[in-house]
Image: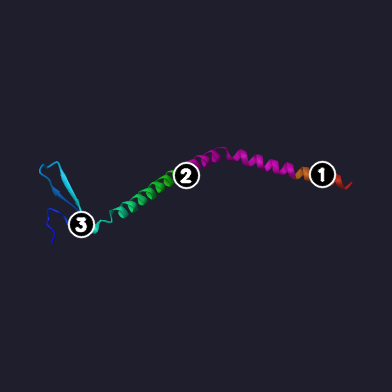
Amino acid sequence: MAHPMYGSGPLRSRNAASSDEIQLRIDPVHGDLDEEIDGLHSRVRMLKGQMTLAKAQAGVKNNMRRLNKSIIQQGSNHVLHVVLFALFCFMVVYLLSKFSRR
């Protein structure tokens, strides 16, 4: 049974002479710490990437909201211009087809 003061895992700490110091002893049997550190490092890198992605998604969402607001505020004029342009194009094509038959 492990001593309650030392812990039971591969890293065991014990109190030193002064209360401000902690001594750390690494158990060589469970010493696959390099692999654990590499795994933790890759997970931290992945989490940083997810945070960057989340920030980018939030920025896109805010810009889409602003764009939708501006389209709603000025959208009726744009729709009217598009309809008038379509009618103008239709009239030009119609008149060209009428005059080209003669």
Q: Residue beneath label 2, please?
A: 61
Q: Amino acid at mark 2?
A: Lys
Q: Is residue 98 magenta?
A: no
Q: CA distance from mark 1 to mark 3?
A: 88 Å
Mark 3: give few (<14), some (14-19) or many (20+) Cα within 10 Å.
few
Q: Nearer the viewer, mark 1 or mark 3?
A: 3
Q: Quadrant of residue 29?
A: bottom left
The circle on residue 9 is 3
Indicate the amino acid at tag 3: Gly
Q: Which element is circle 1 on?
A: helix
* Residue 41 placement (x, y as % from top left): 34, 49
- Where is residue 95 drawn, in percent x and y? 81, 44
Q: Earlier in the sequence, mark 2 or mark 1?
A: 2
Q: Label 2: few (<14), some or many (≥20) within 10 Å?
A: few
Q: Identify which residue, 18 or 44, lies in the foreground.
A: 18
Q: Is residue 8 left or right of residue 45?
A: left
Q: Which residue is mark 1?
A: 96
The image quarter containing residue 90 is: top right
Which image quadrant: the N terminus? bottom left
**Residue range (magenta):** 62-89
